Structure formats: C-alpha cells, structure tokens
C-alpha cells in the first residue's frame, strides 16, 4: 500500500513538472497588481516611494516603460541587461537586441569617429523611462519615415502589456496605441527563441516567417510605400539570384563554399514560412528580405540599430574608433560588411587582415559631426 502511494505521488510529480509554465503576459490579462496599485499603499508603506501622490494609470512606477523594466531589466527575458547596465558588457543576445546600448557615449566607428562621437540615441528605439535614466530621442522628434512622436515612445508602443495572441504580444491592425495612434498592419508571424535560456546562434534564433516589414511600417510607413524614400527592397521576395548568393556565401574568405542546408546566418535574418527556431537552412527564391534582415528591433552597438556596423569596411574594425561593444564577427578576420551575404561585392577584393584595425586600414566612411537622419 505504501509503495502504491509512493508511485502515485511520483506520477503526480511528473504531471506537475511537465505541465506548461505560462509566462506572465500569456493567455490574456495577467494579475493586475503586478503593474498597478490602487492606492500606492501596501502594509503601511508606499508602493512607489518616489511618487507619494501616485503615478499615471495607477502604475507601480513612474512611466509605462519603467514599469515594464521593473521585470525586464534583469533576470529572465531581460531586454535591458548586462552587469551594471554596462554597454560594453551586454547580456547574451536574444534576437531583438538590447536597450543597454542606449547608454553608450559613442557608436561612431567611421573615420575620425573618436573625434566625432555619436551617442546612444542612435543605438535603437529610445525608451521614455526616466527611472532607468533613459529619455526620448534627442535627435529625432518622430519615427523616421513616419509621424509617431519620439516623446511618446516606450515598451507599450509596440507591445500590449495586457496580452495578445500575436508574436511577442505585439499590437496588430485596428489597435489604438498610446490612446492616439492607430496601427494599420497586422503583427508579424514568427516563432521566438526561448527567453529563459541560451543566446542567439545560427541554430537558435527568432524564426521570422512573414509580415515583419509590414508591421514596422505601422510607424515607418514611408520606407514601404514611398519609392523616393524606400531605396532598398523590404518585404519583397529575394529571388533566385540573391537566395543562391546567400546560400553559397561563407565569408569574404570563402565566397562560394557554403550550402543551403547550413547557410542561415542569424546576423542576416530573412523571412520564410518554413523558418524554425533551430533551423539552419538558407533562403529559397520566395524568401523575403525584411527590416530585420539589417536591423535589431530594440537596439545594438551599431548606429541605427544595425545588425552589424554599416560604417566599417572590415568587421574587425567595429568598436575601434568608438570604443563601443564589438559585435561578434561570424567569419574570420578578413570579413568585410555583411551586406555581402546577399550581394557578394567582396568577391574580387583582396583579403586584408583587419585585425590591425586602425593601423592605416581603410575603415569605412568618413566620420561626421552629427548623426545621419534617414527619411525625415
């Protein structure tokens, strides 16, 4: 009898352990007091001692983004992360990038970049989160290619804290964002890598399947519907030639040594309905280039949230002029810009050891005294 009871308890334990653990926002509205406080009071203490008169929307912190970052600036699922919030020591990348680079004092790795600093405003989407020393973009007053006010940008400008069935609880068409801005395009279809463990790699990555560029167009629409501003195709099929180049390209040192089965490069993502989180296959002719092929949704240590630094000739030069975090190079020290993954314009270039970056090696465009403004 005792043995049977032990077996029953063991079986129940297996059931409990194997039951899916829902994340806080999954499957609808989470428990309200995780983000809100009715009276700013609990057990005789102020819930937010910095706001004795309470916060807007009865939040437990001063702003929506500060409330989000109360959980998402540390631990699992952190999007603003790294020891001491140091932009030189970011946490392992999870796909969308890291807001920690907004703290950087210089991102400019062009020639003379050290003398012409471009601060973290250019690293990505600037959150209004004063409790975390983050402020709206001081350079751009509205979204490039659109009209969304920079002063109102925060976590809840893209994500619905009350839950949706969409990828990463993103808003979809017909939703009113920040009580004034209407989204017209649906949320993308994608599968996200786990926020609980691991870092981005070619076999563990966000699987973008469709709709990402259209969704970005909710705020950056002129890049998508105005040919005077949309220069590089986005949300369109690659075609056989580009797909074949991507699949064969294995770095500047090995232009045609790759194979489609292992061609996926997380630093140059693409959209395809067949993409999976663990998938390593490269694109087909019907795969699409998207905004996320070149940019991170949150931020990076490259200007304009680039997946690689667009201002350098060799990836080994990244971080040399600016002193910023060096984005990992997926190939060897000879590697030129990752634009070549699709275009292989380095095909006939001489191989240069860029490990001597800064020692007379051509590092890219000339530096400027101000941040480039695109599409405004």
Image (tube, helix red, strand yellow):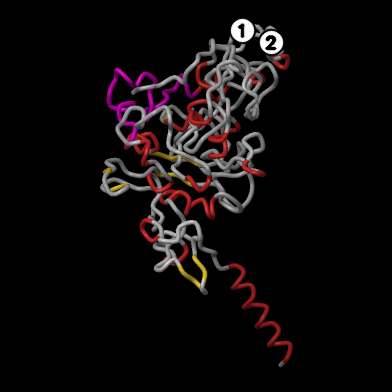
Packing grade of label 1 (10 A; few <14, some 14-19, many >=20) is few
Residue nearer the viewer, 38 or 21: 38
Measured as percent of width and height from the top left, residue 11 is found at 64, 77
Q: Nearer the viewer, mark 2 or mark 1?
A: 2
Q: Residue at image x 44%, y 36%?
A: 272
Residue nearer the viewer, 308 or 370: 370
Badge 1 element:
loop
Q: Is 220 covered by the magenta stretch? A: yes
Residue nearer the viewer, 29 or 245: 29
Task: Determine whether, in the image, residue 44 is placed left or right of residue 327.
Answer: left
What residue is pinned by disc 2?
352
Q: Please say if the residues under marks 2 and 1 sit with CB atoms less than 8 Å apart.
A: yes
Which of the numbered marks, if any, corresponds to residue 349? 1
Q: Is 256 covered by the magenta stretch? A: no
Vertical relation: 76 (above or below) 322: below
User: Magenta residues?
Assistant: 219-243
Image quadrant in which you'd find residue 189: top left
């Amino acid at each position: 009898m005792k043995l049977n009871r032990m077996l029953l308890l063991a079986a129940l334990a297996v059931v409990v352990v194997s039951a899916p653990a829902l994340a806080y926002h999954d499957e609808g509205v989470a428990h309200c007091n995780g983000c809100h406080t009715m009276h700013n009071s609990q057990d005789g203490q102020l819930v937010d001692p910095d706001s004795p008169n309470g916060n807007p929307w009865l939040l437990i912190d001063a702003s929506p983004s500060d409330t989000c970052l109360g959980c998402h600036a540390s631990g699992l699922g952190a999007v603003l992360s790294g020891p001491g919030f140091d932009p030189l020591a970011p946490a392992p990348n999870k796909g969308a990038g890291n807001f920690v680079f907004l703290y950087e004092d210089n991102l400019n790795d062009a020639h003379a970049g050290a003398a012409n600093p471009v601060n973290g405003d250019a690293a990505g989407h600037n959150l209004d989160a004063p409790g975390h020393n983050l402020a709206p973009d001081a350079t751009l007053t509205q979204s490039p290619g659109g009209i969304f006010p920079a002063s109102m940008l925060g976590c809840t400008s893209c994500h619905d804290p009350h839950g949706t069935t969409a990828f990463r609880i993103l808003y979809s068409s017909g939703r009113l964002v920040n009580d004034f801005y209407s989204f017209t395009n649906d949320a993308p279809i994608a599968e996200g890598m786990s926020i609980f463990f691991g870092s981005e790699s070619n076999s563990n990555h966000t699987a973008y399947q469709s709709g990402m560029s259209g969704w970005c167009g909710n705020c950056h629409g002129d890049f998508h519907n105005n040919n005077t501003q949309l220069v590089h195709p986005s949300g369109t099929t690659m075609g056989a030639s580009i797909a074949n180049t991507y699949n064969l390209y294995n770095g500047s040192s090995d232009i045609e040594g790759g194979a489609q089965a292992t061609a996926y490069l997380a630093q140059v993502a693409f959209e395809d309905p067949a993409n999976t989180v663990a998938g390593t296959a490269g694109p087909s002719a019907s795969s699409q280039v998207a905004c996320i092929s070149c940019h991170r949704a949150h931020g990076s240590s490259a200007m304009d949230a680039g997946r690689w630094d667009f201002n350098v000739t060799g990836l080994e030069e990244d971080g040399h002029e600016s002193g910023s975090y060096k984005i990992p190079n997926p190939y060897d020290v000879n590697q030129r810009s990752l634009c070549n993954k699709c275009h292989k314009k380095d095909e006939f270039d001489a191989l240069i050891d860029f490990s001597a970056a800064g020692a007379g090696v051509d590092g890219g465009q000339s530096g400027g005294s101000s941040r480039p403004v695109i599409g405004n």
